[in-house]
Amino acid sequence: DQQVKQNSPSLSVQEGRISILNCDYTNSMFDYFLWYKKYPAEGPTFLISISSIKDKNEDGRFTVFLNKSAKHLSLHIVPSQPGDSAVYFCAAPVQGAQKLVFGQGTRLTINP
Amino acid sequence: DTAVSQTPKYLVTQMGNDKSIKCEQNLGHDTMYWYKQDSKKFLKIMFSYNNKELIINETVPNRFSPKSPDKAHLNLHINSLELGDSAVYFCASMGGYEQYFGPGTRLTVT
């Protein structure tokens, strides 16, 4: 039962343009969401998060938007840079925040 | 200074063998995890320990046995390795809602 879903396995964007990565969830009790970035042969690293009491959180080139009514969040990267090429996972804490459930990941490729 | 470290990074072994993967974190976190990333790239939690006590066991075969000698270490021992155990295994520790991952151990069973 996939509580967090990323339906796009891959995304290709031109350098300098906006990258938009999407994530849907099924559990309306989720109160916090996180985005992780993963390079090949490395572990995922925390990128940005958002509490369910907000609809937007911004950190430099990265902005996460949360639409609770649609159970949807998105990560915007602008402008996209070659170093942003990685796999991005969205995640949410469950079981009293004892564990995270992850989406399947979206591979982002930034083309020069 | 590496926050979460794992050894070895690569492990190639034959079916039926027993192997261990070690994990250490220097972040002072109480909670540590083992994840498996399978061939479809899903990140699935296997175990979680809080201050040396097992708190999550996600129906992992009992050939997998985690051991936490102290809250900074969480090792994973795997008995009688099978082909299906081939995957990348990640250790992580948790502070607040954020988890910090190790670099992963790529296990290949032949």
Image (cartoon, coloured by chain):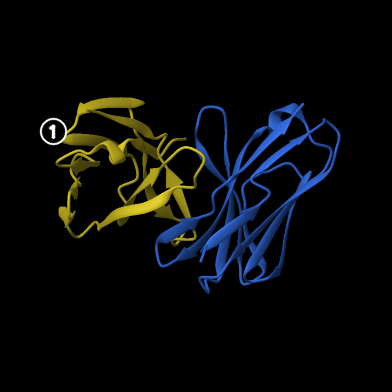
- Chain letter of mark 1 equals A
Q: Can see residue A25?
A: yes
Residue ID at (25%, 35%): A22
Residue ID at (47%, 37%): A40
Q: Can see residue A30?
A: no
Q: Secondary structure at mark 1?
A: loop
* Residue B109 pos. (x, y %): 74, 30
A17 vs B74, left or right, is left
* The quarter of the displayed image where residue A6 is located: top left
Read off the residue under disc 1: A17
* The quarter of the displayed image where residue B60 is located: top right
Q: Where, quadrant-wise, is the C terminus of chain B in this rendering?
A: top right
Number of numbered discs visible in the structure rendering: 1
Residue ID at (47%, 35%): A1
Q: Give the vertical position of A96 relative to A106 (above or below).
A: below
Colour chain A appears in? yellow
B90 vs B18, left or right, is left
- Of A44 and B8, the residue lying toward us: B8
Q: Residue furthest front?
A: A112
Q: Give the vertical position of A99 relative to B83 (above or below).
A: below
Colour chain B appears in? blue
* Residue B50 pos. (x, y %): 59, 68
Residue ID at (62%, 54%): B6
